[in-house]
C-alpha cells in the first residue's frame, strides 16, 4: 500500500517483506526490490472506519484503551477477570475471534505485564498471532538481541554504546547503571530498565490528539504557485473533514514543504479563534505558501492544525464579518450534500482538473 513512484510505502504484505520491502521505504526502491508487487493506493477513510469498529470491541473489554496509531493500541486488563469471568488471555482470545467475525480482519496480540514486553510479544507470531511473554523469561529472551531491538536506540546511540563495549542487550544488562547515566544522560537508566524487561509506563486512556494534518508527495517537483495552491486546497479539505469527524477545531495552522533536495520548510500562523473549516485553513495556509514561492521546486506539501479544542468553540459568527459567516454556512451546506450523495457530488472549482502549468 502506498502512493506514486515518488511516494513511500505505507505498509507491505508479508510476501513483499520477504523481498526486503518495508514501511516508509521510498516507492522506487520498493519496486526495485519487488518488481512484481501490486501497489494499492491507501484508503484512509476505510481504515479509520475499520479502526473504530475494532476499538468498540476493545472498549467492551476495558475502558483502559490507549490508541497508539490507527492499527495499534494498548489495553490494561487489570481487574477485568471478575468482570468477564475469565482470564486476560481468554478475554484477548475472544477479542481476536470477535474482530475476525464481525469486522472481517485478523489481529496479532501480545500479552505481558507491561507495555514494552506486550509490544514485543505482539510481534512474535504475525500474522494472526497470540503470544505471551512473562517477566520471568524476559531477561533471557532479550539477552542475545542487538541493542537496536530496544526502542530509542538509533545509530548514534548504538555507536556510543559500542564505544563502551556494549553491543547486545546482555551487555547492557550487565552494565553499570551509573556509567550509563554518565554516557547517555537519562536515556541510560531507561535503556537499562528495558534491557531487564522493566517498563513503568501506564496505559493512558486519555491520550489527547495534539494535531491533525495531511500531506502529499508529487509525481514531479512543482515550483509554481497555482498547482501548489490546488494541492493545498485538497489537503485543507482532508484536514477539515478529520477535524469535523473528531469534533475538534484548531487555532494554529501549519504549512510543510519539502524541496527537491529533501530540505523541509515549516511555517505557522495563529488564528483569531479556532476553526474546523477548510476555507479558513486554506486561507491561512495559502498566505504562508505565497511567501515560499521563490523558484524552489517542491516534492511535498502538507498542512496541519494544532492548538486543538472542542468544536463548540469553533468559527463563531461575527457581525463585523458577515462574508465569513456566509462562507461558513456554504461549507456546511456542501458537507450536507456530500454526506448524502458522496464526496465527489460537489466540489469547489479549484479542485477540478486543470492545466497546472502556471
Image (cartoon, rainbow, N blue to C red):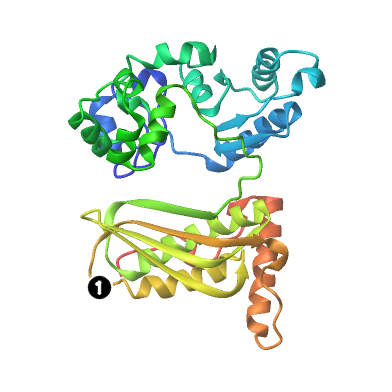
In this rendering, is residue 23 above or below 335?
above
Whether residue 133 is visible, yes or no, is no
Q: Is residue 135 left or right of residue 32?
A: right
- Camera sees residue 167: yes
Give the image quarter of residue 250: bottom right
Q: Residue furthest left?
A: 163
Residue pictured at 48% horizontal, 16% vertical: 126
Q: Quadrant of residue 147?
A: top left
- Quick one: which residue is furthest to the bottom in this view? 320
Residue in front for this viewpoint, 306 or 343: 306
Instruction: Kindly identify which residue carries mark 1.
Output: 294
- Left or right: 125, with 85 as reference point: left
Q: Nearer the viewer, residue 95 or 181?
A: 181
Q: Quadrant of residue 298?
A: bottom left
Residue 148 position, x and y percent, is 31, 28
Query: Measured along the vertical axis of the image, is residue 246 above or below residue 166?
Result: below
Note whether 129 is above or below 157 in the view shown: above
Give the camera-side residue of 283 and 310.
310
Relative height, residue 268 to residue 128 (above, below)? below
* Image coords of residue 297 (percent x, y): 24, 62
How packed mark 1 is, by other alpha carbons closer than 10 Å (few <14, some 14-19, many 20 or more), is: few
Residue at 34 percent of width and 70 percent of height: 225
Task: Quarter of the image for the N terminus: give it.
Answer: top left
Amino acid at each position: 500500500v502506498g502512493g506514486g513512484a515518488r511516494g513511500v510505502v505505507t505498509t507491505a504484505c508479508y510476501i513483499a517483506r520477504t523481498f526486503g520491502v518495508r514501511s516508509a521505504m521510498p516507492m522506487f526502491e520498493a519496486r526495485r526490490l519487488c518488481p512484481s508487487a501490486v501497489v494499492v493506493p491507501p484508503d484512509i477513510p476505510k481504515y479509520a472506519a475499520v479502526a473504530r469498529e475494532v476499538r468498540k470491541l476493545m472498549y467492551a473489554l476495558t475502558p483502559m484503551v490507549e490508541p497508539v496509531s490507527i492499527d495499534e493500541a494498548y489495553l490494561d486488563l487489570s481487574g477485568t477477570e471478575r468482570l468477564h469471568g475469565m482470564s486476560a488471555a481468554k478475554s484477548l482470545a475472544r477479542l481476536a475471534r470477535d474482530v475476525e467475525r464481525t469486522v472481517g480482519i485478523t489481529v496479532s496480540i501480545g500479552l505481558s505485564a507491561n507495555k514494552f514486553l506486550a509490544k514485543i510479544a505482539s510481534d512474535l507470531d504475525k500474522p494472526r498471532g497470540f503470544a505471551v511473554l512473562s517477566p520471568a523469561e524476559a531477561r533471557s529472551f532479550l539477552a542475545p538481541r542487538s541493542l537496536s531491538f530496544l526502542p530509542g536506540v538509533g545509530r548514534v546511540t548504538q555507536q556510543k554504546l559500542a564505544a563502551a563495549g556494549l553491543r547486545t542487550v546482555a551487555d547492557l544488562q550487565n552494565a553499570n547503571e551509573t556509567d550509563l547515566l554518565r554516557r547517555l544522560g537519562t536515556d541510560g537508566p531507561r535503556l537499562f530498565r528495558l534491557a531487564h524487561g522493566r517498563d513503568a509506563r501506564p496505559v493512558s486512556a486519555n491520550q489527547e490528539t495534539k494535531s491533525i494534518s495531511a500531506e502529499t508527495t508529487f509525481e514531479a517537483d512543482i515550483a509554481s504557485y497555482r498547482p501548489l495552491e490546488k494541492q493545498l486546497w485538497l489537503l485543507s479539505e482532508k484536514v477539515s473533514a478529520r477535524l469535523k469527524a473528531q469534533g475538534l477545531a484548531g487555532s494554529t495552522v501549519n504549512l510543510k514543504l519539502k524541496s527537491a533536495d529533501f530540505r523541509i520548510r515549516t511555517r505557522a500562523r495563529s488564528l483569531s479563534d479556532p476553526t474546523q473549516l477548510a476555507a479558513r485553513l486554506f486561507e491561512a495556509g495559502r498566505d504562508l505558501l505565497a511567501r515560499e514561492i521563490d523558484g524552489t521546486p517542491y516534492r511535498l506539501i502538507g498542512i496541519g492544525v494544532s492548538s486543538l479544542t472542542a468544536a463548540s468553540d469553533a468559527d463563531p459568527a461575527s457581525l463585523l464579518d458577515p462574508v465569513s459567516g456566509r462562507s461558513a454556512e456554504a461549507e456546511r451546506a456542501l458537507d450536507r450534500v456530500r454526506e448524502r450523495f458522496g464526496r465527489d457530488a460537489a466540489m469547489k472549482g479549484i479542485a477540478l482538473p486543470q492545466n497546472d502549468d502556471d
